[in-house]
Image: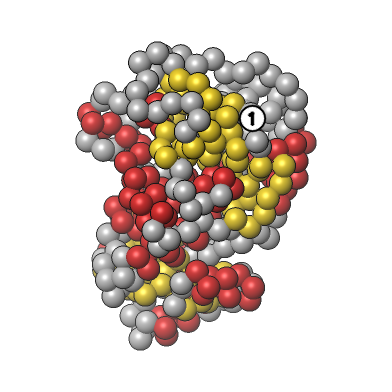
Amino acid sequence: MEARGGPEVLRYGEIAAPPVGAGQVRVAVKAVALNHLDLWVRKGVASPKLALPHILGCDIAGVVESVGAGVEGVGPGDAVVLNPGVSCGRCERCLSGQDNLCPEYQILGEHRWGGYAELVTVPAANVLPKPANLSWLEAAAIPLTFLTAWQMVVDKLQVRPGEDVLVMAAGSGVSVAAIQIAKLYGARVIATASSEAKLAQARALGADEAVNYTRPDWFKEVRQLTGGKGADAVVDHTGAQYWEGVIKATAWGGRISLVGASSGYEATTPLSHIFYRQLSIFGSTMASKSRLFPILRWVSQGRLRPVVGATLPLDQAAEAHRLLEARQVFGKVVLQVG
Ligand SMILES: [Zn+2]
């Protein structure tokens, strides 16, 4: 990426390989999954002062190519998945498992060069073994969205067995993960989506009910499906257009976790609903690096699975961005590299 702007600013070409320093691991990338973060960085909405040229890509699977001085426990030839969060590793936040609140927190492909490349360099702490039951493309489709959904469902909402969990916009990467994690924790999942095809795919992933949220009274359907009560917990990133509906679809005493605002940031919140009905709203971004360990264990057991919706070669990254932006793909858009 040599400028900020539309997909056309992505250029496929030669650039010097990133050096591998002490404590670092250089990985030959096999696959890199796209995230909306890539679009925001490309447009300049995220990290607007970033130095150019820049290499995008936070969700990476590949083979260790070389290791720097002092690296133990991982060596050339190892098949790995990369943890996208990089933090100092020595501050109070890092040492208490809240590394995604570290003042020096960075995300691969946003604050440092990422995986739209043949080689990427990361701290040794960011390397985990690739689950053997996954392809490279599937492995790359896991980290960011499953980490994000894990913090929302498990850490923030603390979903319990038997609860009604509403997952908005089921076709998105985070929601694909959230549906599965909420089911893993014993919840009854109500997913929303914008088309019949996506509603069917949400059910296939384990959603117990599916509601088309392009209908004006969609939140009433959620209430009907929960015996008039509303959802106990909600995973949302749909933004201003749906926010009032989300609040009305939430039960008295319910919790909402918010990880984005696709349709806009400037939403109206009827405050009476928040205090009178005692709602809790949790902002959420990423998760502790530690959460990738249980995620990969569940993936290895086949209880969580990534969904790859489209695959393109690395030199078609611009086209891949257009696909993601059009929101027509159910699951992850992944670039094949090596
Ligand atoms: Zn730190």
Q: Residue at x 42, y 40 (%)?
A: 129
Quarter of the rendering containing residue 315: top right
Bin the neighbour count of mark 1 within 10 Å (Cα to Cα): few under 14, some 14-19, many 20 and up. Answer: many
- What residue occupies the far front of the structure in this picture? 77
- x and y percentages locating residue 115 in the rendered image: 58, 33
Q: Residue at x 35, y 86 (%)?
A: 227
In the rendered image, which residue does mark 1 sit on? 117
Mark 1 C-beta to ligand 1 under 8 Å: no
Location of residue 202 with respect to 316 vertically, above or below: below
Location of residue 120 with respect to 239 vertically, above or below: above
Q: Residue at x 40, y 28 (%)?
A: 74
66, 195: nearer the viewer: 66
Location of residue 132 with respect to 14 vertically, above or below: below
- x and y percentages locating residue 285 in the rendered image: 41, 44
137, 44: nearer the viewer: 137
Q: Residue at x 48, y 26 (%)?
A: 76
- x and y percentages locating residue 48 in the rendered image: 58, 28
Name the colour scheme. secondary structure
- x and y percentages locating residue 248 in the rendered image: 41, 72
Q: Is residue 244 visible?
A: no
Quadrant in the picture for the C terminus: top right
269, 284: nearer the viewer: 284
Residue 50 relative to residue 268: left or right: right
Q: Is residue 134 visible?
A: yes
Query: In what element is the residue under mark 1?
Result: loop
Amino acid at dot 1: Ala
